[in-house]
Image (cartoon, rainbow, N blue to C red):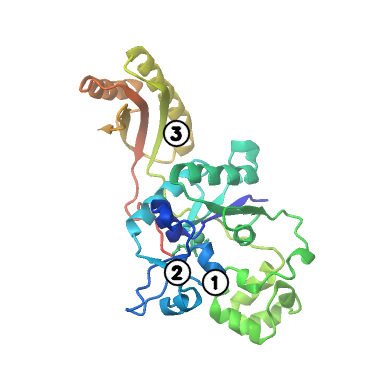
Amino acid sequence: MKKIIHIDMDYFFAQVEIRDNPSLKNKPVAIGGDPKARGVLSTCNYIARKFGVRSAMPTYKALQLCPDLVLVGSHFDKYRKASEEVFSIFFEFTDKVEGISLDEAYLDVTDCPLFFNSATLIAQEIRSRIFKKTGLTASAGVSYNKLLAKIGSEINKPNGQYVIPPDLTYEQCESWSIRKINGVGKVTAKKLESLGVKTFGDIYKFNQLDLVNHFGNFGTTLFYYVRGIDNREVISSRVRKSLSVERTFMEDSRELVFLKKKLFDCFIECKQRLKKYQDKSIKSLFVKIKFSDFTQTTIEKSYLNLDYNDFESLFLKRYAESSKKIRLIGIGVRFNTNSNDEQLVLNLG
Ligand code: TTP
Ligand code: MG
Ligand code: MG
């Protein structure tokens, strides 16, 4: 049985804006939607949601529901940066990461050796690392397939997680809204509702053939989904472009013996972790140094073979060019990537 985690950031665009402007913290806040230009909102925080404000709602309507709503313009560069930070944390646990949008992904952690292979603990740790790195909260669902992991991530939103174990019973899910189902958009939901179908339990009353007659192939999918069956794989939406290992020191240092020892530790760990990527070809080697004043530098050379001496000479060259103490060193390799799949495939929403 698989172990799948679905992660989705809470009120993503709004949370980023509020993080960067704490005076908004206890106010109802929505993103985008110039009322004069008859715009619609991208999203809003949970305070605004109490008033009935929602994503994609026309701004004038949101202001009728919540006259104190604070409208904030969007800053995609910030959302993209936060998203990249969040995704890089996912890759600390598995390469099987399927990005669905900037703020959402599925992870297959079936083979992840960390945290005793407990998907619940991994989800907890991912959310905690996300918060430490970005100051943002995320919610997670944990289950044995994508459908149920996604349903789970909604249950304790915001800033929560929920596990749906394999012994899910009919009683537990019969009252779930069909709108929870992946692929049931407004149109399908309307059609289902016109047949008197609102919940998982209602779909149970139809046999597979009836569902196919009404919904084509999706009818079969529905038939299985409401029985907790979903065999979709997590499809990696991004290929790994590099692998690196780094160490931050308790105290900044310029002691060469100490620094070389740390560099060598990184090398050994990097070599060990590279065993998993024998199908990839290495393009270049690099060394990263962060100084006590937090400035950072990366030195790179093209790859011939994986030799510790190459890393050390890169390091020594840059070490000699500065007199600053060092707080972090890292080494890594970049892989050759097929230009078609190099780019992270992400869309919004
Ligand atoms: P969602 O994850 O759907 O929503 P959210 O993160 O704002 O809120 P939550 O997950 O806590 O329910 O979407 C992620 C971002 O995508 C959202 O912050 C803004 C953007 N978005 C739009 O621009 N238009 C939309 O209609 C939706 C649904 C989202
Ligand atoms: Mg979200
Ligand atoms: Mg989302």
Residue 173 visible in rendering: yes
Q: At x 37% / y 44%, what residue is drawn? A: 241
> Which label is found at residue 69?
2
Nearest the viewer among 263 and 156 is 156
Is there CB contact under 8 Å for labels 3 and 2?
Answer: no
Percent across and percent down for residue 289 are 31, 28
Percent across and percent down for residue 274 are 44, 33
- Local crowd at mark 2 within 10 Å, few (<14), some, or many (≥20)? many
Percent across and percent down for residue 273 are 47, 32
179 sits to left or right of 328: right
The CA span between labels 1 and 3 is: 51 Å
Nearest the viewer among 58 and 64 is 64
Label 1 sits on residue: 51
Residue 101 visible in rendering: no
The CA span between labels 1 and 2 is: 10 Å
Q: Secondary structure at mark 1?
A: loop
Q: Secondary structure at mark 3?
A: helix
Label 3 sits on residue: 274
Q: Secondary structure at mark 2?
A: loop
